[in-house]
Image (spheres, rainbow, N blue to C red):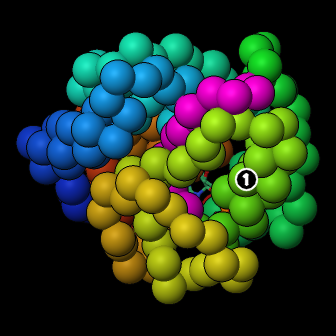
Amino acid sequence: METVRPFITREQIADKVCELGFRISEDFQGDSVILIGVLKGASIFLADLARQITVDAAFDFIAVSSYGNLTQHSGEVRLLKDVDESLEDRNVILVEDIADTGLTLSYLKNLFSARRPKQLKIAALLDKKCRRMVPISIDYVGFVIPDEFVIGYGMDLAGRYRNLSEICVLESSAAM
Ligand code: IMP
Ligand code: MG
């Protein structure tokens, strides 16, 4: 059985998302952005972040496979669903729930930079920096966290817990 320990409260998340939205709005003042959320984990972060952005903002979503049902990275990233729109000459912000090994974000950064965006930025609510296997620079980071498995606010363990409104640490599990 898993034990779930509260880690980042709703208020702390809301304050941070507000701060990130403010920075993005400042950086793209007078211009527009397209937010690209990585399904499914980033959907809740994207929904909240988008509402804190005051410049014109479109959304799109992509899906990649990395974790499957386990808490370990498979080492390989595969695109399961691409964006619907052209990214050429647009201000693209990739929106991810958490950066861990960095494999997913570096794969996506390479993929999307080949599509000639005007700018390509990355926003990640959480950053498990100590787990990085490939270097990746993240432009808008919410919280740098230690090496713990987190769930809630979109993040899951085998599809569960995404609907928790705060971020929790999973202390033990048969799946781990
Ligand atoms: P990376 O490619 O190793 O950086 O992995 C990024 C992806 O792994 C994220 O989009 C998450 O879906 C998943 N992930 C990494 N750490 C966690 C965690 O602590 N909880 C839930 N999902 C995680
Ligand atoms: Mg994810």
Q: Position of residue 37 (x, y in %)?
A: 58, 32
Report the front residue among 152 and 23. Answer: 23
Is 83 left or right of 24, judged from the image as shown?
right
Name the residue: 85% across, 69% down: 75
Magenta: main secondary structure equals strand
Residue 97 belongs to the span the image colors magenta: yes
Q: Residue furthest front?
A: 30
Q: Position of residue 90 (x, y in %)?
A: 63, 27
Q: Position of residue 151 (x, y in %)?
A: 43, 50
Q: As displayed, is residue 137 above or below residue 20?
A: below
Report the front residue among 26 and 6. Answer: 26
Name the residue: 65% across, 78% down: 135
Q: Amino acid at mark 1?
A: Lys
Q: Tag 1's secondary structure?
A: helix
Q: As displayed, is residue 87 above or below residue 42?
A: above
Q: Position of residue 101 (x, y in %)?
A: 65, 72
Magenta-drawn segment = 87-99
Q: As displayed, is residue 22 above or below residue 122?
A: above
Is 138 left or right of 6, judged from the image as shown?
right
Quadrant in the rendering for residue 6: bottom left
Residues packed near mark 1 inside 10 Å, few (<14), some (14 to 19) or many (20 plus):
some
Q: Quarter holding the C terminus?
A: bottom right
Q: Which residue is mark 1?
A: 109
